[in-house]
Image: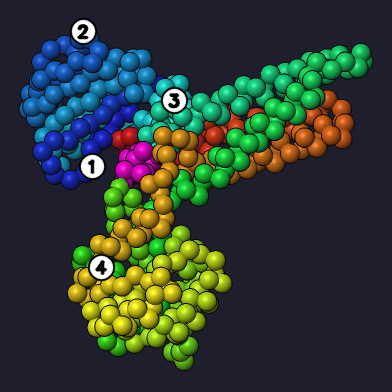
């Protein structure tokens, strides 16, 4: 990996705007910028200072800019960093980029600034990944989870576990040096107690993944029901736009339609589906099949009926729905057509009445959704695992520690015990970056935006 050259990239989104920020990082970041900067001598200025001047290509003025200096190691990457704030013209930005590349800078790869920060010890790998999650966060919940991880909450828990395991691993390694004397430096009962404590932490972290993943990616909610009960109308009412085609013809929706809505800081991913019924239409039948698949993957099912269905018919449908095993919220649409007596007949089903077409009861539905998923009771200041890579490494650690426990209960030689402990340390180290490969880093940082 090339970490000794100077890289450059646009750090603000591409496109015309009021300003654009161009970032350089590397040993020559300040000197290269100084070669094209008309103003103070940047090489003689203090860190964390801003300087107004001109960017010039020989005698040609490109733009008036402000250059921010961050002298190593007091920067995001722990290298010399310059951030040039220029006018947000695509032409100006490209001219400055080309000029500094001509002077010796190299165009940065996706995530390369954060990769350098990790390689230079600014933070560990799980914190680096949280940077990308923080940038992508589009709700308060996902923001809080990413921020907690970026500030090292997850890392500190893992470091404590790993340090304790390393101590026992070193004691067992010492036993190998005295194998002929048949001595034990690592107390097996203490090791077993430690592993049981670690396993309880691993169980809590692994169990938190379902909730952490939901907070990060949104709560998947399937809108299901018989054809023509108003599922697409409800999706449009929730989003306050004509997202799905609405028609009186049954079977209009033949594939899933998805969109997101932020309700009180939590992202809900609503999935409108094909109406559930037996049909000879091959395409519609495929849509019904996909509906049933998505229902099984949902966090919650909003099951809709309407004024044409009797309470007994709805009860039969809910019995079938319960077999899926996913929490559901029963909704009766077109409630503006109901009499009070008709509404009372549905009492035992605990349904929510609304009229998607007339926008009656939609706000009450949002409140019911928040109560049903109960995410506001989650303390996002606690460690929540939201990364698939992390949870897989935790599960691998759990498996390796199970082998250690088995070897303690069924005594084996110290070298086998040491091997399993090292395996557990390896998996924990993969999360924080204590153990890395070039392929792993390439896979992680290639998903970052350029300029970060």
Q: Is residue 388 magenta?
A: no
Give the total number of marks visible in the rendering: 4
* Crowd band around label 2 with a 10 angstrom C-alpha radius: few (<14), some (14–19), many (20+): few
Where is mark 4, residue-wise?
A: 361
Cα separation between marks 4 and 3: 48 Å
Q: Do the residues under discs 4 and 3 have CB atoms within 8 angstroms?
A: no
Specify which label sits upstream in the sequence, 1 or 4.
1
137 and 98: which is toward the camera? 137
Residue 76 lies left or right of residue 193; in this view the side is left
225 and 305: which is toward the camera? 305
Region in magenta: 130-145
Cα separation between marks 2 and 1: 31 Å
Residue 402 lies left or right of residue 136; in this view the side is right
* Residue 44: image tag: 2
285 and 194: which is toward the camera? 194
Where is mark 3, residue-wise?
A: 123
Compared to residue 67, the image places residue 398 above or below, namely: below
Where is mark 1, residue-wise?
A: 13
Q: Residue at x 32, y 79 (%)?
A: 343
Q: Do the residues under discs 4 and 2 have CB atoms within 8 angstroms?
A: no
Q: Position of residue 330 (x, y in %)?
A: 40, 71
Indicate which label's residue lies in the foreground, 4 or 2. Answer: 4
Specify which label sits upstream in the sequence, 4 or 3.
3
Cα separation between marks 2 and 3: 29 Å
Cα separation between marks 1 and 4: 39 Å
Q: Quadrant of the C terminus?
A: top left
Q: Position of residue 431 (x, y in %)?
A: 54, 34
Specify which label sits upstream in the sequence, 2 or 3.
2
**To which quarter of the image does residue 419 belong?**
top right
Specify which label sits upstream in the sequence, 2 or 1.
1
């Amino acid at each position: 990996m090339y970490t000794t050259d100077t890289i450059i990239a646009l750090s603000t989104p591409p496109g015309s705007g009021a300003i654009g920020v161009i970032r350089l990082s590397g040993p020559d970041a300040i000197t290269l910028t100084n070669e094209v900067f008309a103003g103070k001598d940047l090489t003689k200025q203090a860190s964390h200072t801003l300087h107004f001047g001109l960017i010039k290509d020989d005698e040609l003025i490109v733009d008036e800019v402000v250059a921010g200096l961050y002298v190593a190691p007091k920067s995001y990457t722990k290298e010399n960093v310059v951030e040039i704030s220029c006018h947000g013209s695509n032409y100006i930005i490209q001219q400055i980029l080309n000029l500094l590349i001509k002077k010796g800078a190299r165009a940065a790869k996706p995530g390369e600034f954060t990769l350098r920060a990790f390689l230079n010890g600014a933070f560990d790998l799980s914190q680096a990944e949280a940077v990308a999650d923080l940038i992508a966060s589009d709700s308060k919940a996902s923001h809080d989870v990413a921020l907690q991880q970026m500030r090292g909450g997850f890392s500190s828990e893992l470091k404590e576990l790993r340090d304790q395991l390393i101590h026992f691993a070193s004691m067992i390694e010492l036993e190998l040096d005295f194998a002929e004397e048949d001595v034990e430096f690592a107390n097996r009962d203490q090791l077993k107690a430690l592993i049981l404590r670690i396993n309880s932490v691993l169980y809590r972290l692994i169990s938190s993944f379902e909730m952490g993943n939901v907070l990060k990616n949104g709560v998947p909610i399937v809108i299901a029901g018989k054809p023509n009960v108003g599922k697409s109308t409800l999706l449009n009412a929730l989003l306050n736009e004509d997202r799905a085609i609405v028609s009186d013809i049954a079977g209009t929706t033949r594939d899933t339609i998805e969109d997101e809505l932020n309700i009180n800081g939590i992202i809900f991913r609503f999935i409108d589906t094909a109406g559930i019924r037996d049909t000879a239409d091959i395409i519609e039948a495929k849509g019904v099949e996909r509906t049933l698949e998505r229902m099984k993957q949902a966090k919650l099912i909003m099951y809709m009926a309407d004024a044409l269905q009797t309470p007994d018919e709805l009860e039969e449908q809910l019995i079938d729905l319960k077999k899926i095993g996913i929490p559901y919220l029963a909704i009766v649409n077109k409630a503006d057509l109901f009499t009070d007596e008709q509404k009372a007949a549905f009492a035992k089903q605990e349904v929510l009445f609304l009229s998607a077409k007339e926008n009656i009861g939609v706000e009450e539905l949002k409140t019911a959704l928040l109560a049903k998923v109960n995410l506001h009771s989650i303390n996002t200041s606690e460690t929540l695992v939201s990364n698939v890579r992390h949870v897989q490494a935790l599960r691998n650690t759990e498996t390796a520690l199970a082998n250690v426990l088995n070897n303690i209960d069924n005594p084996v030689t110290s070298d086998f015990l040491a091997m399993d402990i090292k395996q557990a340390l390896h998996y924990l180290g993969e999360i924080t970056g204590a153990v890395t490969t070039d392929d792993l880093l390439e896979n992680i940082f290639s998903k970052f935006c350029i300029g970060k």
